[in-house]
Image: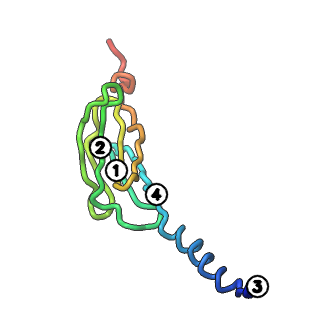
Amino acid sequence: MFEKTNCSALLIPVLVLCLVCPAFAHKPLLAVDEQGDGTILLEAAFSNGSSISGSKIILRNLKSGKLIKQHTLNQQGMLRFKKPEAEYSITLDAGEGHKITVRGPAPRDHRKNDTRKEQ
């Protein structure tokens, strides 16, 4: 009635697919580092090590949503830019639904950091 099938003949292709699919999975990673010179350094990468160069970085005003500036990552997946004066968000758009949005480091209120005494 039914022919006896070899389970390993079916199991091996299924296992191969299960092992190969996660190898293609990747997600974008973004590191934001405030420099002491008034600039922000971004470093971005895909979790699997594939290139993220050329991806867009979009800066938006947090309150109004207005575009502040748009940049492109360099060959190393890095970007340095002048820190905006308003509160802002940073969006990494690496295409194909790979987007990350984070809040940029808060603007410094230099009056609060001024240690000089008023006379």
Residue 32 as seen in the image, left or right of residue 67: right
The secondary structure type at the circle numbered 3 is loop
Q: Nearer the viewer, mark 1 or mark 2?
A: 1
Q: Nearer the viewer, residue 89 or 24?
A: 24
Left or right relative to 117: residue 68: left
Q: Amino acid at mark 4?
A: Lys
- The residue located at (36%, 18%) in the rendering is 117
**Amino acid at the residue labelled 2:** Ile
* Element on which disc 1 rests: strand
Ranked by sequence position, the earlier of labels 1 and 2 is 2
Outermost residue toward the front in this view: 1
Query: How far apart in space, not on screen, are marks 4 and 3 (Cα)?
Result: 49 Å
Residue type, mark 1 in image: Asp
Where is 119 relative to 35, above or below?
A: above
How many numbered badges does the structure rendering display?
Answer: 4
Earlier sequence position, callout 1 versus callout 3? 3
Q: Which residue is mark 2?
A: 58
Judging by the rendered image, the residue that carries numbered circle 4 is: 27
Give SS at disc 4.
loop
Q: Please give the residue where the numbered disc 1 appears in the rendered image.
A: 93
- Mark positioned earlier in the residue sequence (4 or 3): 3
At a point 30% along the width and 61% down the height, the residue shown is 53
Q: CA distance from mark 4 to mark 2?
A: 18 Å
Q: Tag 4 or tag 1, which sits nearer the N-term?
A: 4
**Residues under numbered marks 1 and 2 in contact, where contact means CB atoms less than 8 Å apart:** yes
Q: Badge 4, how many Cα within 10 Å: few under 14, some, many 20+? A: some
Residues at marks 1 and 2, CA–CA distance in whole angstroms: 8 Å
Spot occupied by residue 31 in the image (x, y as percentages of width and height)? 42, 51
Q: Nearer the viewer, mark 1 or mark 3?
A: 3
Q: Residue at x 39, y 47 (%)?
A: 33
Q: Marks 3/2: CA distance?
A: 65 Å
Crowdedness near tag 3: few (<14), some (14–19) or many (≥20) residues, C-alpha within 10 Å: few
